[in-house]
Every structure is written in structure tokens, then in C-alpha cells.
Amino acid sequence: MARLRGISHILAGIVLGLFASRVWAESQSAALSAPRLLLIAGLACAAGGALGWASARLRIRTWPLFVLLAYAAWPVVSPAVAGWVAAFALLALALANLPARANWLVEGPIAVVAFAVYAATLAPGLLPADSGEFQFVARVLGIAHPPGYPLYTLLGKLATLLPLNSVAWRVNLLSAVFAALALALVARTVRRLTASAVAGLAAALALGGITTFWAQATTANIRSLMALFTALMLLLALEYGARPSEKGLVALAVAAGLAVGHHGSLGLLFIPLAIYLLVADRLLLKRARWLLTAAGAFVASLLVLLYLPVRSLTGAPFDPSPIDSVGRFLEHILASGFKGDMFYFARADLLPGRIGVWLNIVRMEFGAPLAVAMALAGIAALARRPKALLLIGGVFLVNTATAITYRAPQTVEYLIPSYVALAVLLGIGLAEGMAWASRQATLRVLVAAGVLALCAAPWVANAPSFRALHQDHSTEQTARTLLGSAPARATILANWHWATPLWYLQYVEGARPDVRVLYVYPEGATPNEDVWIRRIGEALRQGPVLITNWFEAYKATPYRFVRTEGGWQVSDAPMRDVPPGMVAVDAVFDGKIRLIGYRLSESETAPGKELRLWLCWQPVEPLDRDYSFFVHLVDAGGRVQGQSDLTRDGRLYQA
């Protein structure tokens, strides 16, 4: 037997040599001659065989290397297939040489590695919309939109004190910290339930690499902190269920208070939490002192909400809706303006469609194979751990039901607490699968390696996109250009996407204090374009106006709109000067229209890229009708490769 094991180790090493020689040969720019290729393969196999012999002496299990045969015999060149086969073999090799019930600490390494990945793909600076608001509100200790996020604002203020990079970047970095800690807690929760470090690692991998979680981990937002609180409450509840104690109950109460103080939607998770606590500790309602102490701790943790009225009354630099009464305080922290959106889709005619949306989201986030693995893991958990499933499954169901029936475009973000629960279920299911296959070491290793590979797939797939976003400075560039090009004492009417980065430049950097930036908010059932037209008219009475949004309805107004970088400058008087940056020309068409200037966005272009052309023209005589302008992009042979047409209202122009 010993001799056979030695032979198998040598053969495994030879397979490694074959695999390595093929991958090396395929990476060369020029084809290798047959003799040279055979020589390299022979040397690689000899070296691999020697490694196999040495591994036998060291009692290292090398059988997973036989997996490499899958690519050694693959009929076509495929670096992607080679990479996945190698990754699977390495995972299996590592798992094969670990104890069957390895329970070593993984939380620290997970947090460090995840933070490093998120920091390396962090958004580089200023961001639009809510993220832009959080970036400057944290710096100036202002008041964010409802429900206010006081805890996040205070933690963000601490982050802005770091002597690193820009203020915006520092607040982005805070999300990476929250996300990395959330993954560590997910791994700890699974390890607490299963005594399996591999299962904990799988759960963290499954959650950390999906698109939405990664996006929230690299931008200034409140979702990564929600994930952290969800994972923390799950862990503390399970710890209490295993060993009830007053200290454990108080810790859970503090976490719950901070969680609901951060975002009220996390309060809905108290339903499965309460049910689990009552089932896990049947004496809970008789522990009066514990309950009283926990209630006091819960209320004390809610005191962070007092930041909002106190800061408002002391003159917060940014405070769009001053909180000067108890009613306004409650309206703000409860986000009463959005109450009509809660359970909006919880109707028999709409709910089936929303369930379909949810299925697509899960498939998009995790991929079909990993989503199926999670479903099977939930079934496995149901059979062996009913109490844990009551809590974890309850959190998943409550959050999912709330998110998919809520009327808002960010459903993928609202589902993050359910993603946390799904990841924990996956880890539990993997541990159950490994325990079931414990008598067959080979099967156990293959199951674990397969699941880990599935969990790692989103990291590999999403990394290029987030590396590209790490280099994206477009928001800051556009906001600076728009603000910098505004005439003196101008008003910029902006949607939420652009209002917040413009405010950041004003509040944090002190740029252009003479310019007013006004957010044009939706007004109920009033069509958005009508709101903008009215706001434009109001602003024009006070000076120059720039806008960030274009509507076709503008064509029916008496205003002139000149395209600028990032927006449009609006005028209620005829324009008689050529805008700066135009190339002067003088071409008259049919004695009626004179082309006097143009500007081209690029001097060179390629298929698939956008090319913008600005034309400056004026009527030579009063126009009798509307005129259409067309632009053709032609190649050297005169063939049209692209075109664009635009019709202008002749009534808007004076000769």
C-alpha cells in the first residue's frame, strides 16, 4: 500500500508537470517546435514527479492534482478554463490537507483581505446622489435626508479626520471598513453554528463578491453599515440562544437600538429576533431584571437620534428641513414622506411580478449555480437546525417581503439584510454537506472545493468592473466644470444626482459661494418637466440659470438652451454672441440660415464611441417654418457611417 501511495503521488506530480508545461507553452507569443515542446514537457513532468515523491515522504495528500488532467486533455486553448481548473485543484489540495473539522480562526484574515480588496477598488473620490450627500454632510456635521442617519454621520465625521486623500475618499473608505467587518461576523456566525472554518469562509466569500455588496463596500453609503448590524444581531442572538445571560441580552439590545437608530427598516427584523429568543429561552419572559436592563440599554442606544434636533437647533450648515418640533423630529426619523411606498406592491395583481423581479435579482447577484446551492443549503439547515433556521430564515423572509413590496428603484440595495441571511444559510448547508460526506474524504473535499469555487466566482467576474470604477473621476470632473463655468451669481437647478456633488464642492471646498445650487424635487403628481419649467422661470427672474436636466417639453417654451459641459445654460432673451470654444465659420444655407460656429467633442473616433457636434447658427431673415438640421459622418469614400437629425422651432429665433 505504501508503494502504491508513493506511485500515486509521483503520478499526481507528473500531471502537475503536464498542466504547467501546457499553460506555459500557450502563454508564449510564438509557437514552439515539437522537439522543444517535448523537452519542456519532459522536464516539467520530471520536476513534478520529484515533487510528488517528496510529498509522499511528507505525507501530503496530492490526489486533488489529478483534477488538472481536465485541462491537460482539454481540446482547445482557454486561459479561463485553465484558471478555474487550477483554482479548483488548489482549493481541493488545501482542503484535503486540513483536519475534517478544522475550526481555526478565519474572521481576522477575512476582514483584512476583504478590506484590502475593497480599498484597492474604492471609488476614488466625489460621488453623485446620496453618496455625495453623505460625503459632505459627514464633514460639516449636517443633517442628511430622512431618516437622517445620525450614527453614520458621526462615524463619517471621524473618518473625515484621517490625514489621507480627499474628504470624499475617506468617507468611501468607511464603507470598506463596515463591509469587511460584516463579512468577518458572517464567518463567525457560521463557525459558531457549525464549528467549520471552511463553511465560514464560504459564507463570507458568497456575500462579499456579489455586485451590490461590493458596490456598497466601495462607495459612501449606509447599506454596508446595515449589513454589519444585521450580521451582528444574528450572531448575538445565536450566542444568547446557546447560553442565555443578562450580559448577552443587553449586548443584543444595544446592537438592536443602534441598528434601528441607523435605519428604521432594520426594526422589522425584530420580529424574527423576538420569536427566536422566546423559542430559544422559554424562561425569557420570567427574567424581569434582564428584560428591564435590556430595555434600558435599548433606549440608551437610541439617544444617538438626538443628534438631529440638537444639531438643527444649533445651526447645522446643511439642514434643508429644520427640525424645530417633536412632530418634525418624528417625521424625519420615521421618513414619513415615504410611507406611501411601504408595501405598495403587496397586492394580488402586482406581487407575482415582484417575485419574478426578486428571482432575477438573486440570479443576477449570485449566479444561478450559487443560488441553487443556497436553496439546497437552506433545505439542509431545515433538517438539522430548526431553531437557527427560525431566526436566519425569518430575517431572510421579513427583509425580502419588505424590500420587494417597497416602491423604489433601489430594490437590490434594500435586499442586503436578506443577502446576509442567505450567506449564513449557505455556510450552514456546506457544513452539513461536509458532515454527510465525512466518511468519504474525497467526496467531502470535492464538495467543499466546488462550493468555495462557486463562491469565489463573483469576485473574479466583478473585479475588472470595480477596478475600472476605481479610476472613474467623471462625477468630480463634471461637477467642477459645471460649477466653475457658471456665470457670477448664477443659479444651478439640479436633480439629486448632481445637486449633492455640487454642494460638496461648496460646503467642503468652499468653491463658488456666489452660486446657488437648488435641488429640483418631484412634486407629487405634477409632471416632472412642468416642475422644471416653472422653477426655470422663477430662477431666471433672479439672474443667470444653468440646469442639469433636459426635457423635450422645453422646446415649447420661450427659453433658449445652450449645451455646456454637464448641463445647459438657459436664457429668456435671444442669443447674439457666439459661445466660447466654437470654431468660427460663415456658411449661408438657401439665404435663410447662417452657420457661424461649431465645436466637435473629439478629433478622432471609432465604431461604438460617441461623437458630439455643437452647431451655432442664426436666421438671416424671419423663418417661415421649422427647419431640420442633419449631420452625416462619412468615410474617405463618401459613404455615410452615422447620422443625427434635429428639428428646431423656428418661432424661437429672431433675424
Image (cartoon, rainbow, N blue to C red):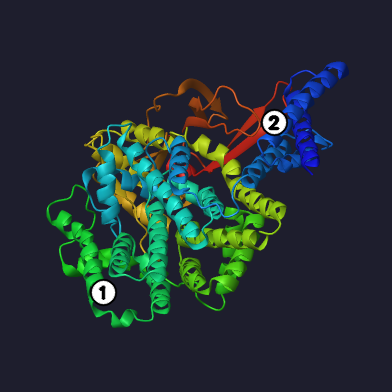
Q: Nearer the viewer, residue 373 or 653?
A: 373
Instruction: Give amino acid for label 1.
Output: Trp
Given residues 243 and 5, the one toward you in this image is 5
Exactly how many numbered labels are in the figure? Answer: 2
User: Dot 1: few (<14), some (14–19), or many (≥20) neighbours within 10 Å?
Assistant: some
Q: Residue at x 32, y 48 (%)?
A: 134
Residue found at the very far right of the displayed protein: 34
Task: State the residue lying farthest toward the front.
Answer: 2
Tell me the residue that label 1 is attached to: 290
Left or right: 359 in relation to 219: right
Q: Nearer the viewer, residue 244 or 135?
A: 244
Residue 118 screen position, x and y as percent: 46, 41
Check the picture and name the quadrant holding the N terminus. top right
- Residue drawn at x 46%, y 72% as measured from the top left: 344
Find residue 442 and report its horizontal and vertical position in percent: 71, 51
Residue that carries the numbered disc 2 in the rendered image: 54
Identified at 35% across, 81% down, the residue is 283
Q: Residues within 10 Å of mark 2 (few under 14, many from 20)?
A: some
Mark 1 element type: helix
In the rendered structure, the answer to whether residue 540 lies left or right of residue 650 reads left
> Which label's residue is closer to the chain start, 1 or 2?
2
Q: Quadrant of the C terminus?
A: top left
What is the quadrant of residue 507 in the picture? top left
Tell me which corner region of the image, top left, top right, bottom left or bottom right, holds residue 565.
Answer: top left
Please determine whether, in this image, residue 281 is positioned above or below residue 2: below
Q: Eyeballing the image, is 444 above or below 502?
A: below
Q: Is residue 544 visible?
A: no
The span from disc 1 to disc 2 (Cα, nearest Å) is: 60 Å
